[in-house]
Amino acid sequence: MKVPDTSAARVLVVGDVMLDRYWFGDAARISPEAPVPVLLVEREEERPGGAANVARNCAALGARTQLLSVIGRDGPGTRLARLVRQAGVRASLHRDRSIRTTQKLRVIGRQQQLLRIDFETPPSREVLASKLAEFEAALPQCDVVVLSDYGKGGLAHIARMIRLARAAGKRVLVDPKGEDYSRYKGASVVTPNLAELRGVVGGWKGEKDLEARAQRLRGSLGLEALLLTRGELGMTLFRRSRVLRVKAEKREVFDVSGAGDTVIATLAVMLACGEPLEAAVRLANRAGGIAVEKFGTAVVTRQELFGG
């Protein structure tokens, strides 16, 4: 296949950002104080998470990427902003004194996650409302908008963002959260996984029932397509006139965290540089397969995706 020119792609990412932290070490002992392992920390890592990971995946594929979000006026926010900048992302991260930057601290012993500790405070609606003007101003400089919803409060005005982006003629991709998908009405593509879709449409009996439920949801939201990510079963793209099933590429699954970020980022970049939707889905499926071979929130580069 002809390799797309991703340098021409312009992607705007908006949503919940977080700092993913990792403590790695050896957990060979049990604590004398309680029946829990004792981790001797040997090294620490920090990576951009959430919408920030989507943005750095877009940048790693060669796209010109802008990120809008809210962080706290704290050390983790400063470190997250630096990591995003180092990834080649142009970021506008509003710093709010009333919140703490969302962090996910994972404690890892011998490549096994022992514990995850979360720190977060939802941003106020007033802060988020102030981002709408900046969002609207950024629309002319992008080809595709990604709204990365992690349920942390950063997309309280998502319905209005979708309306503004669509009015500007931009495709809008949504990585959804929660059971109320009505706020995603009018988006171009929504990308739930199996558990997320089940929480919205209920359980299904076989592929025919799944297709009927997915198509009803797609139609009720006025979507161009609904892309269901299915882990080792690959992906299914539901469009009005047809259904595309893409098998997962056989790979050794090491860690699925962050794979959804890679999928929606790849889809956005490919659409932004003019690839047809179905071709973009196939490339996103390939990128997701590469991502699960890596530990933690990771990026897939243009070289890895296309080879060479």
Image (cartoon, rainbow, N blue to C red):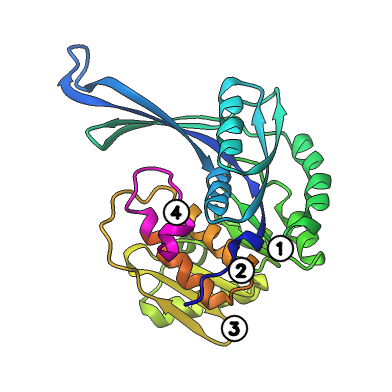
Q: CA distance from mark 1 to mark 2?
A: 8 Å
Q: Earlier in the sequence, mark 3 or mark 2?
A: 3
Q: Earlier in the sequence, mark 3 or mark 4?
A: 3
**To which residue does mark 2 refer?**
271
Q: Which mark is residue 300?
A: 4
- Mark 1 and mark 2 in contact? Answer it, CB < 8 Å: yes
Task: Tell me if 168 is positioned left or right of 178 in this view.
Answer: right
Residue 146 located within the stretch drawn in magenta: no
**To which residue does mark 1 refer?**
143
**SS for tag 3?**
loop
Give coordinates of residue 97: x percent, y percent. 70, 22
**SS for tag 1?**
loop
Amino acid on which the number 3 mark rests in the picture: Arg
Q: CA distance from mark 1 to mark 3?
A: 23 Å
Give coordinates of residue 50: x percent, y percent. 53, 44
* Up-down relation of residue 227 to residue 195 (above or below): below
Residue that extends furthest to the top in the rendered view of this protein? 33
Question: Which residues, given as a range, are shown in magenta?
Answer: 290-308
Residue that extends furthest to the front in the rendered view of this protein? 308
Q: CA distance from mark 3 to mark 4?
A: 30 Å
Q: Main secondary structure of the magenta part?
A: loop
Depth order, front residue of 101/86: 86
Q: Earlier in the sequence, mark 4 or mark 2?
A: 2
